[in-house]
Image (spheres, rainbow, N blue to C red):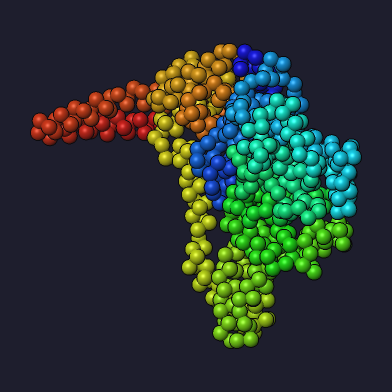
Amino acid sequence: MANQISEELIEQIRSTNDIVDTIGEYVQLKKQGRNYLGLCPFHGEKTPSFSVSQEKQIFHCFGCGKGGNVFTFLMEIESFNFYEAIKHLAERAGIELPNDAINQESSLSKESQQVLSAHEWLMKLYHHLIRYTKDGKQGLDYLQERGITTEAIDTFQLGFAPNTKDFIATFLEKKGFHPQMLVKYGLLVRGQDDSVTDRFRGRVVFPIRNHLGKTVAFGARAMEGQEPKYLNSPESDLFQKGKMLYNFDLAKKHIRKQNEVVLFEGYMDVISAYQSGVHNVVATMGTALTEIQAKLLGRYAETVIICYDGDNAGIEATYKAAKLLQQTGCQVKIASLKNNLDPDSYIKEFGGDAFKREVLEASQTFMSFYMQYIKKDYNLSLEGDRIEYVEEILKELAKIESSVEREFYLKELSAEFNISVQTLLEEIEQQRQKLGAGKDKWEKDRYTNKVEKSRGKLLPAYHNAERQLLAYMLQNRTIADKVQEEIGVSFNIDDHKIIATYLYAFYEEDNPESVSMFIERITDEKLRKVVIELALIPTQTDISDKEINDYIQIIRNESSTGVSIKQLKAEQRLAEQQQDPIKAAQIALKIIELQRQVKHLN
């Protein structure tokens, strides 16, 4: 690969794709000091330990230890190989790759690549039929009757599958796709007579795209009496309903910008909202919200507005989704729809502006929704049920960190049930103690300890000196040249010796002072992690020669005295074995004196 894409082009692609912007498409990042923090996408956590340095163009998680540059991030999160990461970032930046680099091997199997290609061809055909042919007019009329505009049809690449037996099968076979593979992935179905036909024939078709915008499946809706009413592609290694959200590829940039996402249950809800100007919208695909989907939303937005149907089934689904989203750290709001309408019907009856103003902007907090939701489980005309209801509400309120928010709802309870706010406050404090309200502090302390330990605060002085010196060498070639001249690779820690060797060679090739570029030279995963940790150590912009010399001297002292101390300790053990306590004590004094000298120099 390297002989087809030059180092200069790779560096251009890397420098054009800012790591904060790129990772920001997957993780909600907040500026904290010189770096950005977020929840790690590679392991579950509630306290952010995922750090991104814009200055050094690297990332590192202090929790799971993963780290690297913009290429390695994409390779980790998308399971790309190196070439695919380069290709993705080149397309993102509008950089054209050389022709001889286009046909590099994909991390996807040959079959998966063929399936993606078949879906792409079929999506284009279905869309062409509904927009430009008589065969698709039935589907076009249906969508227009449902209030879907031509612009929305094009945006979502909606289509129509003609009600013919072998039209689609013949089309795909002519494109070189084997019928057996197409049946396996549900684009065609095999009849009792062994013939193959289009799974979706006679239906309006909704392409389902993954987060990268690749069509991986279809949803289809019957128009006239067909059963079932809704039909999806079967699940496969490319399409798993519980891991995907409809329209996520188009919505994610709007979600990041607004730090908020609206969650629906159906395709038509999304399309209606999108064409009325609400673009931060996604939907589940005929199944309840899963933990994977909830975590995905939590990475992109602080707030999730759940906007499900207003009937009883929709309310039950809302409660379950809200609880799941709360567990993943999201702030949840509930949009209420009057007259038991679904979002699509509401927008058609009252318009997009009313939907934004009276539904989304007027959405309830989860607590307000919950206080109404659980009333169905109690007969509030009975004293016992009223007490149980209040106690249940207090348990939920105890989970809220904001004292202002807690008191707001306590006043509502106080007014409704004629209980003093003070009594409710005392009860809620007991509940918070049971829950262990200090857990968040513990989580923060645990994260702080990880960071401090990773930065070498608890390590020996010579180890800290080596880490600090390497941190300066990674960002300053002049310092690296000085260290090379003074001590070469005579570091005391083996990993540091190897990193220094790589770094000297890197600078000798006249490469720039770029950690992001340097870590590409480190193939050993353990060493790469060490380099990233070193690069994130805080440094001074105007460090003096004296401070650099002090670090060098500490390293030299350890090199010379470390061996002596080891030898003396061996002699001390021998004297003890020979039962010569006087000699052992004399050696111990020498060891203490050497250690004192080292400590004084440090």
**Residue 492 x/y as whole percent:** 39, 25
In the image: residue 548, left or right of residue 236: left
Quarter of the view holding residue 396: bottom right
Residue 20 in sight = no
Q: Is 296 placed above or below 372 here?
A: above
**Residue 325 x/y as whole percent:** 62, 56
Q: Is 370 placed above or below 580 here?
A: below
**Residue 361 x/y as whole percent:** 79, 60
Q: Is 70 placed above or below 61 here?
A: above
Q: Nearer the viewer, residue 240 or 508?
A: 240
Quarter of the view holding residue 383: bottom right
Residue 485 in sight = yes
In the image: residue 277, left or right of residue 262: right
State the residue at coordinates (41%, 33%). 461
User: Which image quarter holds the N terminus?
Assistant: top right
In the image: residue 486, left or right of residue 332: left
State the residue at coordinates (67%, 20%). 103
Q: Nearer the viewer, residue 254 or 192?
A: 192
Q: Is 2 placed above or below 111 here?
A: above
State the residue at coordinates (67%, 81%). 416
User: Which image quarter holds the C terminus?
Assistant: top left
